[in-house]
Amino acid sequence: MARTEQQSNDKFAGRWFWRYAAPAAFYPLAGKIEKIGWVLAVVLAAIGLYMGFFVAPTDATQGEVYRVIFIHVPAAWMTMVIYLAMAFWAGTGLVLGTRLSFMMSHALAPTGAIMAVVALWTGSLWGRPTWGTYWVWDARITSTLILFFLYVGYMALSAAFDDKKKGDRASALIALVGAINVPIIYFSVKWWTTLHQGSSVRPGSSSMATTMLWAMLIMTFAFWAYCVAAAMHRLRTQIIEREAGAAWLDGATK
Amino acid sequence: MNWESWSAFWDMGGRGFFVWGSYGALLIAVVAELLSLRSARKAAIRSLHDDHETL
């Protein structure tokens, strides 16, 4: 990048952003973030699962089956958060033309899709004993299924072009347009009469026992750390694929 | 402690199928993702070094 362009960009985005927008500079940093993510994920999951199964009490109305919440809610949150992050980086790539932004967006998508599957699967198994059905075309469940299809469409479209730049741009549009679905999922339990229960956790108040809530929050951070680590790993693989031929990669991958 | 025995733990108040079906699916998903991450990395590094040798 030309020095003058870089300096003018410093004014609005900060020097650190442009330094790490270079794949060669971010590759080692991504590796460090990935390692921290794996460690945090394992430690937090161990604490969260212990609290969830051995400290949190039996639920008064649902009995033991409510313990699905410790993975269901984190997965549902992560699939929404990851989608927003994916759309953010896709938009950043479109506006600033930074190739690392598109790679970041691609790196997030598979993990987000997996989180959608986990949220739907665990919700289905939880729904059977509590609502009497594995599946219902309820607003929240349907919009989460749509989010899964958006992830799949995004990945399919980005892979469909021989010219990676075209694939980046086309898939970025799906990511951005589809982002409207995330607030729809979030507010669906308020906007429509639905079988899915309302939020158990709201800013400032909660309808859950303290130990249940803590177990769920710790599991959420564990999921968060896992998703960051998985995305960083995938990002580094993409950098290897896309920057093939760059001299610095030889040393970094041997 | 919530459980009188390990069998009570696995039984989950008669809801073991739903609880462990959920946690089991998560475990499968995570293991599958980790394996795919690893094989994608290996393939990328292999093709990177192959390209260099043919140059």
Image: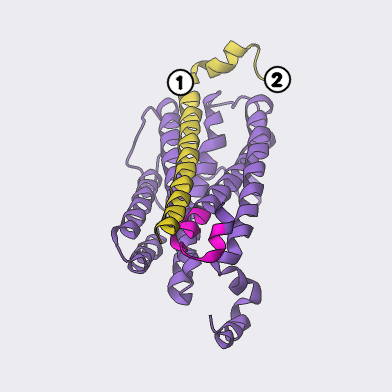
Q: Left or right: A178 with respect to B27?
A: left
How far across and how far down the image is residue A117, in percent? 41, 41
Q: Chain of mark 1?
A: B
Which structural element holds mark 2?
loop
Question: Is circle 2 on the same chain as circle 1?
Answer: yes
In this rendering, the answer to whether A196 lies above or below A190 is above
Q: Tell me the purple chain.
A: A
Can you tell which mark lies on residue A209?
none
What is the residue that sits farthest to the front in this orientation? B54
Residue A194: give x, y in percent of width and height.
40, 43
Q: Nearer the viewer, residue A149 or A137?
A: A149
Look at label 1 and name its amino acid: Phe
Rendering coords of residue A61 (x, y %):
55, 26
**A102 to the left or right of A4:** left
Q: Residue at x 46, y 64 (%)?
A: A245
Which sits in the foreground, A127 or B40? B40
Q: Earlier in the sequence, mark 2 or mark 1?
A: 2
Which image quarter: residue A59?
top right
SS class of the residue under badge 1? helix
Chain letter for the part of the structure drawn in yellow: B
- Stretch of the chain drawn in magenta: A235-250
Q: Is A171 located above or below residue B21 in the figure?
A: below
Residue behind mark 2:
B1
Q: Magenta segment, principal secondary structure? A: helix
Q: Nearer the viewer, residue A96 or B22?
A: A96
Q: Residues within 10 Å of mark 2 (few under 14, many from 20)?
A: few
Dividing the picture into quadrants, the one containing residue A63 is top right
Measured Cα–Cα span from mark 2 to mark 1: 22 Å
**Numbered circle sitting on residue B17:** 1
Q: Amino acid at mark 2?
A: Met
Asked if the stretch drawn in magenta spans residue A220, the answer is no
